Amino acid sequence: MAKNTIKGNAIPKHIAIIMDGNGRWAKARLRPRSYGHKKGVDRMIGLMEHAFDLGVDYITVYALSTENLRRPQKELDGLFELIRTRFLDCMRKVCARGARLRIIGERALLPADVQEILAQSEDETKHFTGKGINVALAYGSRAEIVRAANLAVEKGETLTEERLSELLYTGGQPDPDLIIRTGKEVRLSNFLLWQAAYAELYFSDKMFPEFSDSDLDEAIAYFSSKTRRYGKTDEQIEKGE
Ligand code: IPE
Ligand code: IPE
Ligand code: MG
């Protein structure tokens, strides 16, 4: 769907993307999985730029789950090498639009030099406010919730929904309005389970490296066609109650 068919007021503030299908995309082209991941990084940057152009404020991408750390070491080494060689440049390029970068996940599980690169990228963008990019690495939503709960326990606090939200890695940010998953699977795979409570979910059969800017437009058009009732009736929503 063309960009100009999307109503300005219907642009999601926060889009989260489960970037799945890199390996299958490469395999179908008789290329190694690492080639799929490389193409996936290029597409990730393109989609982030396109989303910011459309007026999206926050973008969260699922790049590596805690469970993915059980993949063969060779594949993991390839992914870490991509971070070493591409991450700083890529993030400088997109964050130049005024976006603050946050790495969400259990970063201590990543190699020490990779952790340093991530910290440096975050540091370079820490003065930006209003727009944000979250890159989920060694991320698991259940672990994130348990971590937040334990932070409250350590402080002797009683949790409320608002306080738990604040203690998550995404604390202070709006919840995702739209969660997109590429790669044909219809599941969340331990991604933003708490934050997804009222997100619209969009599943694409396309593998991530082939998910184009116009595919993102289509996902946003789907989002804008939905009425978000938050438990109320259509009549209440029409009256603005
Ligand atoms: C998603 O693509 C990226 C990561 C999990 C790192 P996959 O690597 O899961 O690709 P498929 O699902 O095997 O095609
Ligand atoms: C989800 O994809 C994680 C990322 C995209 C980083 P997976 O390929 O790991 O998901 P499952 O294992 O098929 O659920
Ligand atoms: Mg997969």
Image: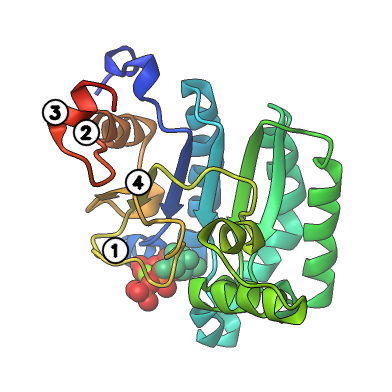
The one of 172 and 241 positioned closer to us in this rendering: 241
- Callout 2 environment at 10 Å: few (<14), some (14 to 19), or many (20+)? few
For this orientation, the residue located farthest to the top is: 4
Q: Assess mark 1: CB under 8 A from ligand 1?
A: no
The label shown at residue 235 is 3
Please determine whether, in this image, residue 160 is positioned above or below residue 203.
Answer: below
Q: Is residue 52 visible?
A: yes
Q: Give the residue type at disc 4.
A: Glu
Label 3 vs 1, first from the N-terminus: 1
Mark in front: 4 vs 2: 2
Distance from Cα at disc 2 to Cα at disc 3 = 12 Å
Q: CA distance from mark 2 to mark 1?
A: 38 Å
* Disc marking residue 227: 2
Closer to the chain start, of discs 4 and 2, is: 4
Disc 3 is placed on an element classified as helix
Picture layout, residue 42 above or below residue 127:
below
Image position of 106 (left or right of 3): right
